[in-house]
Amino acid sequence: MLCSRFLKTRGEKRPGRLNRTAERGSNGMLHAYDGSLQWVLHHRPVMLVVFFVMLGATGYLFVKIPKGFIPDQDNDSMSVITEAAQGTSYYLMPSISSRCRK
């Protein structure tokens, strides 16, 4: 019974326009990938030079980029600031904030 859902009869209609467009796009990308892969495989010495240039550039940037802009550790803290008129009591603050949200 499950095979009847997957097997197609000969009289079925063609796939829709979106399906055909997606299939052409997928085949185009596959063709471009195949062409670029063939080029790389035929120019191995060039790609070896590119690899070592990229490796050197990565090492250079690792040394040159400052390391202090990323924190060493996450201290799991969050800071919240609330403001109210001077003299407002602590117990009045929740009622003020609930009126502001409406």
Image: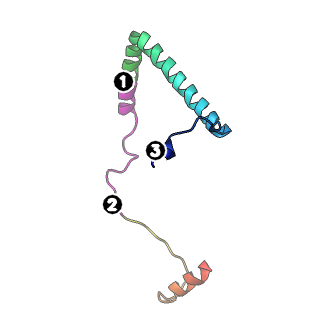
**Mark 3, residue position:** 3
Q: Residues within 10 Å of mark 1 (few under 14, many from 20)?
A: few
Q: Which image quadrant is residue 60 in?
A: top left
Q: Quadrant of residue 96?
A: bottom right
Q: Nearer the viewer, mark 2 or mark 3?
A: 3
Q: Foreground residue, 43 or 30?
A: 30
> Reading the chain from its start, which is encountered first: label 3 or label 1?
3
Q: State the residue in front, 27 or 93.
A: 27
Q: Secondary structure at mark 2?
A: loop
Q: Amino acid at mark 1?
A: Leu
Which residue shows up at 43% across the image and 10% down it?
42
Examine the rendered structure and indicate whether residue 66 appears above or below residue 49: below
- Asked which secondary structure carries label 3, the reply is helix
Q: Quadrant of the C terminus?
A: bottom right
Start-end of magenta stretch = 55-76
Residue type for callout 3: Cys
Identify the residue under disc 1.
55
Cα gap from disc 2 to disc 3, whole angstroms: 57 Å
Q: Which residue position holds label 2?
A: 75
* Marks 2 and 3, the one that precedes in the sequence: 3
Q: Is residue 85 visible?
A: no
In the displayed structure, 74 sits above or below 15; it is: below
Residue 50 placement (x, y as % from top left): 41, 17
Question: Residue, x 63% and y 34% (percent of image)?
Answer: 20
Q: Residue at x 49, y 89 (%)?
A: 89
Cα distance in 3D space between marks 3 and 1? 52 Å
Instruction: State whether residue 19 appears in this view.
Output: yes
Q: Residues within 10 Å of mark 2 (few under 14, many from 20)?
A: few
